[in-house]
Image (cartoon, rainbow, N blue to C red):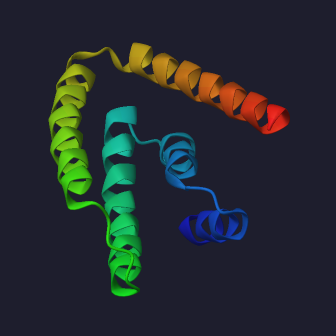
Amino acid sequence: MGILIGFICGFIGAGGGMMMLLVLTSVLGYELKTAVGTSVFIMTFTALTGAVSHFALGGMPDLLLLCLCVVFTLIWARIGARIANKADPILLNRMTGVILIVLGIVISVFHWIG
């Protein structure tokens, strides 16, 4: 499944995190909290590889902005993990579904407008 998702996402230029989340929960039966953690762990290596190649080609980012992104990502990841660990799994699944549907609608609207 990972190879297929990687091929599809590489071909169309999309991120595969949400597709992996769907596979981990629906096909492999992971609990949502575990699936999210696994998906983010996998994306870490993908993003790190992309960033290293980008830097190697001379695309250096604004270091202040990079540091701010790292710090706030760590802070909000910790807050999100605490909330997710206290949440009811069924409610968490439903909230995730609603958020993904809303994001899909928003992206579609922006695609049709632009």
At x 25% / y 51%, what residue is drawn? 65
Q: Is residue 53 above or below residue 85?
A: below
At x 37% / y 83%, what residue is drawn? 58
Relative horizontal placement of residue 57, taking residue 106 as reference (left or right): left
Q: Position of residue 110 (x, y in %)?
A: 73, 33
> Which residue is most to the right?
112
Q: Position of residue 46 (x, y in %)?
A: 40, 68
At x 53% / y 45%, what residue is drawn? 18
Relative horizontal placement of residue 80, taking residue 107 as reference (left or right): left
Relative horizontal placement of residue 13, taking residue 18 as reference (left or right): right
Q: Position of residue 112 (x, y in %)?
A: 84, 34
Q: Is residue 23 above or below residue 11?
A: above
At x 36% / y 20%, what residue is drawn? 89
Relative horizontal placement of residue 89, taking residue 29 as reference (left or right): left
Foreground residue among 48 and 60: 60
Foreground residue among 111 and 98: 111
Q: Position of residue 8 (x, y in %)?
A: 69, 65
Foreground residue among 93 and 55: 55
Count of numbered circles in the view: 0
Residue 106 occupies which quadrant of the picture?
A: top right
Please state, as top left, top right, bottom left or bottom right, where the C terminus lies in the image: top right
Residue 15 occupies which quadrant of the picture?
A: bottom right
Please state, as top left, top right, bottom left or bottom right, where the N terminus lies in the image: bottom right
